[in-house]
Amino acid sequence: MFDMPIVCSSKGGNRWTDCRTGDSYTTAREIWSKAPAAAARKATADGVNGISIDETGGKFYIYQISGYTHERGLYCDLLNEAGEVVKSI
């Protein structure tokens, strides 16, 4: 689970991006080691299929999480720096 790739868009880091799709990747292990626990819990939850991060300074500020679950359907959550959902789309 921790080494499965998660699609992310990244700002401020030196992350490799696939030129065919524009996708870059991270893992749950990397998220848990660099992001606040509240944001990491949301970013690695079942149904998440993409996140947006700011990697400036080596820490992850996860500001958007998107995915699909049976309960919520298709969703996109915007997070603050503490990992709290400030808006759901």
Image: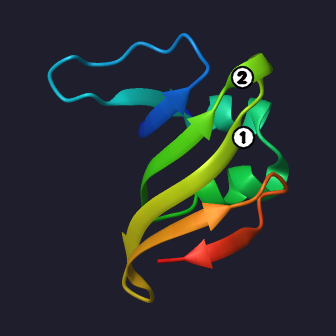
Residue 4 seen from this side: no
82 or 69, nearer to the observer? 82
User: Measured along the vertical axis of the image, is residue 4 above or below residue 88?
Assistant: above
Q: Is residue 44 left or right of residue 19?
A: right
Please name whichever residue, 66 or 2, is drawn nearer the observer in this view of the structure: 66
Identify the residue at horizontal 43%, vertical 28% (top origin). 25
Front residue of this view, candidates 27 and 85: 85
Where, by quadrant of the figure, is residue 38 drawn? bottom right
Residue 23, horizontal then vertical, whole percent: 31, 30
Q: Is residue 87 visible?
A: yes
Tag of residue 44: none
Residue shown at 73% from the left, 54% from the top: 39
Decide if residue 39 is on the left or right side of residue 63. Answer: right
**Can you give x and y, in whole percent of width and height, for residue 49 in the image?**
39, 54
Q: Residue furthest bottom?
A: 71
Determine whether the residue tagged by mark 2 lies in a helix, strand or loop.
Answer: helix
Please rate how many residues cluster around mark 1, counting C-alpha atoms within 10 Å: few if below 14, some from 14 to 19, many from 20: many
Give coordinates of residue 51: x percent, y percent: 50, 47
What residue type is disc 1 on? Tyr
Describe residue 50's horizontal placement relative to residue 35 as left or right.
Answer: left
Question: Disc 2, disc 1: CB below 8 Å?
Answer: yes
Which of the two labelled residues, at mark 2 and mark 1, occupies the earlier sequence position? 2
Does residue 4 sit above or below 63 in this rendering? Answer: above
Question: Can you say whether 57 is above or below 36 in the image?
Answer: above
Residue 64, given in percent of the width and then of the height, sits at 56, 55
Residue under the image location 82 percent in, 51 percent down: 37
Q: Please state which amino acid type lies under the numbered disc 2.
A: Thr
Residue under numbered circle 2: 56
Which disc is residue 61 wearing? Answer: 1
Residue shown at the point (21%, 17%) measured from the top left: 19
